[in-house]
Image (spheres, grey):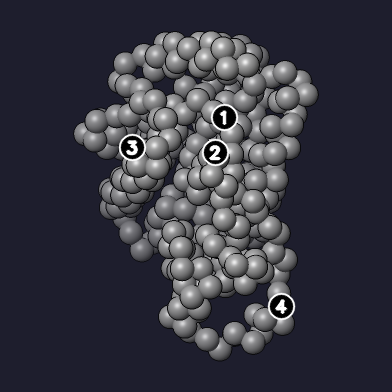
């Protein structure tokens, strides 16, 4: 776990190679094919240092599909069962705070199919009225980004209405125990170092063709509205491609927005800490793999003792 640009993928790969494990991506955008640089898949990391690692959670569907928290939970159970059957451990790497929360709390999720008749009934309602309805049905709403886009707002309300006694937009109340007995590793960087890392990584991705990636998706028929909902990188790339912002202003504005996103991720981590989850913080400027392996070995001894 950790904020964006702290080096989570590299650490996960290092752990997986050392432990003979597979990597499971805990990310809501890396599931889409073609959204590589924009979602930060860091595909080259998985092939460095030898044979390519097995990775779950990448390139699961096309951009004309929608990937939900429910689908992630189903996939996570599938990957966990496969890990048990093969004896190959999993290194979960993320990422998306809501997905991490669902894993760690053990949410029981229910599928909510689309409701076209209901959508026709609320077609004339404004965003404010829909948001009020969502907050009424789900007073514990924490994913407030659903309130900023009509499609996401409608889907969140659709899910919440489908769940009897709904909480957390599509989740039944979590159990008292965590969803998995995991060793929770958090990569830390001082704020100045993190901001510099964000700028450096953004420069590398722009140089690698981030704008070209978005242009190709547009040429391939992906609607701009869809790309706009797929994260900051695609949103700012669209602005530059439309001539609304100069390249220098685009890079600066995007770096600032990624920094704000990183701060929101850090806020989620503090929430996990306040909840009493045993987070182990690693120095992202030092040798996090050595630190992590020492913790993994201790964790293994504790599990053996408990068994």
Q: How many marks?
A: 4
Q: Earlier in the sequence, mark 2 or mark 4?
A: 4
Q: Which residue is mark 2?
A: 178
Residue projecting furthest to the right: 85
SS category of the residue bearing label 2: loop
**Above or below, 91 relative to 198:** above
Residue 283, how many percent across, how many down? Answer: 32, 21
SS category of the residue bearing label 4: helix
- Assess whether mark 2 and mark 1 are in contact (beta carbons under 8 angstroms): yes
Q: Which residue is mark 1?
A: 181
Question: How far apart are the alpha carbons under marks 4 and 1?
Answer: 40 Å
Question: How far apart are the alpha carbons under marks 1 and 2?
Answer: 7 Å
SS category of the residue bearing label 3: helix
Question: How far apart are the alpha carbons under marks 1 and 3?
Answer: 31 Å
Question: Could you say which is closer to the camera, residue 68 or residue 207?
Answer: 68
Residue 102, how many percent across, how many down? Answer: 55, 46
Q: Is residue 287 left or right of residue 184?
A: left
Q: Earlier in the sequence, mark 3 or mark 4?
A: 4
Residue 42, how many percent across, how many down? Answer: 52, 31
Q: Which residue is mark 3?
A: 198
- How many residues crowd around disc 2 within 10 Å: few (fewer than 14), some, or many (20 or more)? some
Q: In the image, which disc is placed on residue 116?
A: 4
- Assess whether mark 4 and mark 3 are in contact (beta carbons under 8 angstroms): no
Question: How far apart are the alpha carbons under marks 2 and 4?
Answer: 36 Å
Question: How far apart are the alpha carbons under marks 2 and 3?
Answer: 32 Å
Residue 218, how many percent across, how many down? Answer: 58, 57
- How many residues crowd around disc 4 within 10 Å: few (fewer than 14), some, or many (20 or more)? few
**Quarter of the figure with the C terminus:** top right
Q: Earlier in the sequence, mark 2 or mark 3?
A: 2
């Amino acid at each position: 776990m950790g904020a964006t640009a702290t080096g989570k993928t590299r650490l996960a790969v290092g752990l997986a190679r050392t432990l003979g494990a597979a990597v499971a991506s805990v990310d809501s955008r890396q599931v889409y094919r073609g959204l590589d640089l924009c979602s930060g898949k860091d595909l080259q990391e998985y092939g460095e240092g030898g044979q390519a690692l097995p990775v779950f959670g990448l390139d699961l569907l096309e951009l004309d599909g929608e990937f939900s928290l429910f689908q992630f939970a189903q996939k996570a159970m599938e990957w966990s069962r496969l890990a048990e059957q093969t004896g190959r451990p999993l290194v979960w790497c993320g990422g998306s705070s809501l997905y991490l929360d669902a894993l760690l709390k053990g949410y029981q999720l229910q599928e909510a199919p689309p409701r076209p008749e209901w959508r026709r009934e609320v077609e004339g309602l404004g965003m404010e009225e829909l948001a009020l309805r969502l907050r009424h049905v789900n007073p514990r709403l924490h994913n407030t980004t659903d309130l900023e886009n009509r499609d996401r707002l409608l889907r969140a309300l659709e899910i919440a209405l489908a769940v009897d006694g709904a909480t957390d937009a599509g989740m039944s109340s979590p159990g008292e125990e965590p969803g998995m007995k995991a060793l929770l590793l958090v990569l830390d960087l001082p704020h100045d170092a993190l901001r510099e890392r964000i700028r450096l990584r953004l420069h590398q991705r722009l140089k690698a063709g981030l704008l070209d990636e978005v242009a190709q998706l547009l040429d391939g028929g992906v609607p701009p509205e869809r790309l706009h909902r797929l994260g900051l990188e695609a949103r700012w790339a669209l602005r530059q491609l439309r001539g609304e912002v100069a390249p220098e202003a685009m890079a600066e504005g995007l770096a600032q927005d990624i920094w704000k996103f990183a701060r929101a991720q850090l806020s989620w981590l503090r929430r996990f800490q306040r909840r009493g989850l045993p987070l182990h913080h690693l120095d992202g400027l030092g040798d996090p793999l050595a630190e992590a392996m020492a913790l993994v070995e201790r964790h293994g001894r504790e599990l053996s003792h408990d068994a």
